[in-house]
Amino acid sequence: MGKWKNQALTMHPVFFDPLNKKVYMKESGNIDSLQYMEDPGAIEVQEDRQVRFRFFAPEAKTVEVAGLGGTMGNEHFSLKPEGNGYFSATVDGIKPGFHYHNWYVDGVEVQNPHGAFGYGCFKAINFFEMPEEGTDFYYLKEVPHGDVRIMKYKSQVNSHIKACFVYTPPGYEEKRDREYPVLYLQHGAGENETGWIWSGKLNLILDNLIKEKKCTEMIVVMCCGYSFIPETAPVFYPGDFDRELTEDCIPCIEKEFRVKKGRAYRAIAGLSMGSAQAMLTFAKHQDLFGYLGVFSGMADTELDKILTEKTYAAHHIFLSCGKGEERLAEKQQAACGQLLEQGIPCSRASYNGFHEWHVWRESLREFAALLFKKDGIEGITTDIMDKQGSEPRTQISGEMLRKQTWEEQVLFFDPAYKKILFAVDDKGNPAGRYRDIHHGVEIEGKAEVSFWFLAPDAEKVEVEVYGMKRRKLNRADGEEGRQGYWTVRLEGIEPGFHYHEYYVNGNPVLNPMAPVGYGAFKALNFFEMPETDFHEYLLSDIPHGQIHLNYYQSSQTGRSKMCYVYTPPGYT
C-alpha cells in the first residue's frame, strides 16, 4: 500500500473500498467473456502529493475542476483531452484537507460519476482527501473497531421516520453488563446524518483514541438535524429539532442501548448549524447535558441563556474553529472569557483551515478527550423520559411512508430538497431562509415520472432510463426555466427499480438531486416506480431492525472490507 493509500482516504458511502475497475467483453475463440481492466477513477493523490484529475467527457470541448473555496480555493484547473474520451490534468500545490469540488463540462457545473461522493451543499457532491504529513488520527488502523448502526425512530415534529447513525465502542456487544455515556453530535447546514461517519471519520477517530486510552469509551449518536414542517418558513433553524431530539430520539436511544443516565453522562455538540442546534438544546436543557461542544459556530442568544441560567453547573464547554475563520475566532475567544468569568469551565482551540471537515475532525478529537472525566451526578437530574411530550404518539400517513420509500438512498435516508439563502440579522447572527427545490426524479402517477436537472448553462440535457431510449429534456417554463431547470415527463415506465443516466451536452454525468446508488462500476442515479402487487419493501410505521456497518479483514486482498448486517427489532 502506497504512502497515501490508507483506506480512510478513499472510502465513501457509495463504495467503501473503491474497485477502480471497469469491464469489457473480450473475445476468446468463439466465446465472449467478461474481462476486468484497471480504471484510474476520477482522482488520484500521487506519491509526490500531486493530484491527477480525470473525467470521461467524449463530446466535451472543455473540462475543468475547482474547489469550493477554503483550503483548496476556487481556482479552476483545466483538463486536457487524452484522445480516448477522457480529459485529465495533474495539479501541484493543493493543500492538505478534505476537499469538496465541482467539475465543469463546457462551463456547466456537474458531478463526476467516477469520483467519491458525499452529501454536502444539499446535494450529492464529489470530494477527495489530501493527507497531511504526520497526521493519521482519522486513519483506518489495525485496532479493535466499534460498531456503526443505522437506527430508525419516529419524529413527532414532522411525522417522518428518521434515521440516525449510532457508534458503539469496541467490546460493546461482549460487555453486556456495562453502561456507557453518550455524545449527541450534529452536522452542519447542507449536510446530514451521514456526514460525521463518511466525511468526519468519527468511528475511526474514536477507535484510535480508545485504543490509545486518550478518551472514555462512549456511544455517539448522529442525527439528521432537519425537522422541516410543511407550510412553515423556518429561519436558520430547520424546524424544531430540539423537541425531536429530546422527545423522540434520546428516549429511543436510552431504550435501545445500554446508556448511563444523568447529565454527567450526556454531551451534545455540533458543527456550524449543528453547533447552534447544540447550543440551543444545551441552553434549554441544562438539567439533561453536562458537556457542550461548539465547532465553527457561536449563537449569541443561547450563550446569554447559558451565562444567566446556571441552575446546573456545566462540566465543560469547548469552542473551536478554523484559523481562517478569524471573526468567529474572535467571538469564541470573547465567549470563552465570559464563561470563565462566570465560573463555567471552558476551553477553546483553532486549527489550520477554514469552515471544513479537517477542522471539525480535529475539534472532535480534542473534545472527545475532555468528555466524561467527572463521575457522579451533580444536583437534581431529570430523567429524559420525563421530557417526552404529553401529546398522543402520532401515526405516520401511508402517503408519507410511500414517499420516503421512493426517496431513500445511501447518501440520505429522508432527503431535504432545499437550498439555503444565506443572510444575517441586525446583530450579525445567521438568519438564512430555506427554499424548496425540485427533486431530480418526481413520481407523477402510475407509470409516469418527471425528471428535473439544474444546468442553466447547458446547450442540451438528456436522460436514459436503462432499457429505454435516451430522451431530451426541455428548458422549463417560467421562473423554473429562468433558474436553469431542464425537465421531461415520461410515460410507460414499468414498475420496479430503474437505473438511469444523465447527459449534459452529450457527456455522462450524475444528477446530484436524484437518488444515488452504485451500478455499472460507478455512482449511478436510480428511482423506484411503485409496484402494485408487492408491498413488503415499503417503509412502514412498525418496529424496525438496525443495519450494522461492520469491518472485516479480507485474506484475499489484505484490505479491510465492510459488510452490512441486519438485526431484527428487539435484538440486543
Image: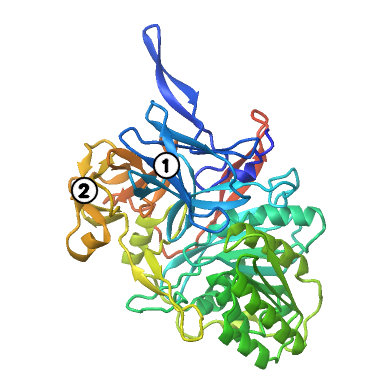
Contact? badges 2 and 1 (CB < 8 Å): no
Q: Amino acid at mark 2?
A: Leu
Residue receiving disc 2: 473
Camera-side residue: 275 or 47? 47
* Left or right position of 10 against 336: left
Which is more toward the observer, 156 or 419? 419
Which residue is located at x 57 percent, y 70 percent?
252
Residue at which label 1 appears: 113
Residue 169 visible, this orientation: yes
* Vertical comparison of 399 with 333: above or below: above
Residue 344 spot, x, y in % from top left = 75, 84
Q: In the rendered view of the protein, which quadrant contains the C terminus? A: bottom right
Q: CA distance from mark 2 to mark 1?
A: 20 Å
Colour convention:
rainbow
Residue 288's place in the image compared with 170, above or below, is below
Residue 216 x/y as whole percent: 78, 64
Which part of the image, by quadrant, shows the N terminus?
top right
Disc 1 residue type? Answer: Pro
Q: Is residue 91 above or below residue 549?
A: above
